[in-house]
Amino acid sequence: MLFNTLEYLLFLPIVFLLYWGFNRKDCKLQNLILIIASYFFYACWDWRFMFLLIFSTLLDYFSGIKIHQAENTSEKKRWLWLSILINLGFLGVFKYYNFFITSLTDGLSIIGIQENFVLLNIILPVGISFYTFHGLSYIIDIYYGRIKPEMNFVNYSVFVSFFPLLVAGPIERATHLLPQISRKRTFNYTMASDGLKQILWGLFKKIVIADNCAEFANTIFNNHSNYAGSVLVLGAIFFTFQIYCDFSGYSDIAIGSAKLLGINLIRNFAYPYFSRDIAEFWRRWHISLSSWFKDYVYIPLGGSKGGIWNNIRNILIIFLISGFWHGANWTFIFWGLVNAIYILPSIFFNTNRNNLEIVAAGRKIPTLKELMSIIQTFSLTAFAWIFFRAENLKHAFDYISKMFSFSLFSLPYYPGIGKTPSTIFMIVVLIIIEWIGREQQFAIEDLGRSWKRIYRYLFYYILILVILYFGGKEQEFIYFQF
């Protein structure tokens, strides 16, 4: 069930009405409705993988209790590593087994050894990377004494499988989400209103921007050898906006849906394309994943302690793991490496925390220096996204080679270019609205609060009409494959 479908448009109001309609003295019935709704939501993808989700939930639920009840550190570690290894084992088999076997076969063939290893003909369970990381953070936090285990299995099941975040995040922490699940929620009109606005903005980004950019990006990337370098630059820019609006649009719909149910999810995007350097970009892009790797991998490795070279080592490890988390392809690993190389100068010169606040805070326009820094960071990011989008490394390097040929300076032309002005116009609208709302949690959170009601609602109706006009493709969200 996709967020951008009529099915979800029917599903969410039904859950909303049942959820608040059975609003009794405690949260038990609310949580029971949430767990039923979440498993139904997941079963709409493939009911067979519900058993994997249930097993993962049971594993971490009982492991957390055993870790807490363990009488010594050795026993705690045994239960911790049992859960970690089984969780990562499932993730490895479903997501990475064929990649490792294919890479091993290719490596052996280079030195003249021909082997035919068995590949698995399996599909990737949707959301496995996300709910696996939910469970891992839970048991690690229990091991380090940050939280106590949740004894109510339904409550814990909601934490793992809450349908807005189940298939593509944000990656929640038990310290943040479980306390909300464990207490009764009461309806809050302001929160629900913000949720609807955030869903609306997410749908605009997904349907109007991402899906239309996808059409052009796919055409250009899939036929890159036929086009001039100037066209390939356009393709990279289209994909840059596609992946941002696709994933941040999903996050907005997820967070907005949770708000309708009285639950706050953690923020996942904070206007990353307004960043002035790569370090700031990574503080604003996929925040839940970046902070997860920082807290559960980077800091345990030593973080920035132990000297500059240890810090560089840890940075490289984090970015390579982050790339690999995104998919079983060398393109993702190389994408992670490119971003690591981008950020290393700021580590050397200790400038990685120069830009902690949003750009031009309290001002309407940026300074020329800020604008140039934004353009530079955006350009570096767009270049790195080429590796993320490419089918393989050869495709990526061929694309880049053709892009930087003399044809870079020719006028761009490709079949269908006449359809691009409307999409480019909408991208400009997106940039303007996000710039105006860049100090808010999402772009239209406060937009129009001071307007007369008729103008405020007219703006929302225009957004809805634009979404309906551009709708109909129902393309999957990019991050569902991760």
Image (cartoon, grey):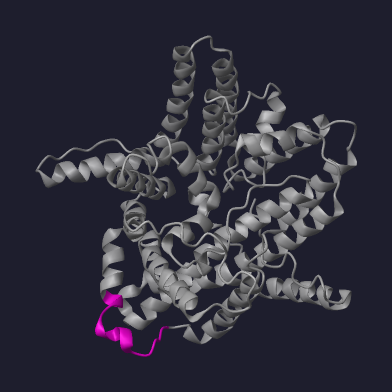
The verdict on residue 403 being magenta is: yes
Q: Percent position (x, y) of residue 34?
A: 74, 38
**Looking at the rendering, which quadrant does residue 412 occupy?**
bottom left
The answer to which of 465 and 195 lies nearer the viewer is 195
Which segment did they paint magenta? 402-414
Q: Percent position (x, y) of residue 134?
A: 56, 36
Instruction: Identify the residue at image location x=46%, y=27%.
Output: 84
Numbered-mark total: 0
The answer to which of 359 and 395 lies nearer the viewer is 359
**As drawn, 178 above or below 348:** above
Q: With 296 as the anchor, is 192 left or right in this view?
A: right
Q: Percent position (x, y) of residue 250?
A: 61, 57
The verdict on residue 390 being magenta is: no
**Looking at the rendering, which quadrant does residue 41 occupy?**
top right
Taking the view exactly as shown, the residue that stands out farthest to the bottom is 411
Q: Percent position (x, y) of residue 331?
A: 33, 55
Query: Is any part of residue 94 visible from this angle?
Result: no
**As drawn, 108 above or below 53:** below
Instruction: Identify the residue at image location x=53%, y=83%.
Output: 419
Taking the view exactly as shown, the residue that stands out farthest to the top is 71
Query: Is any part of residue 230 visible from this angle?
Result: yes
Instruction: Identify the residue at image location x=85%, y=50%.
Output: 188
Instruction: Identify the residue at image location x=42%, y=69%.
Output: 377
The answer to which of 189 and 225 lies nearer the viewer is 189
**Looking at the rendering, which quadrant does residue 451 occupy?**
bottom right
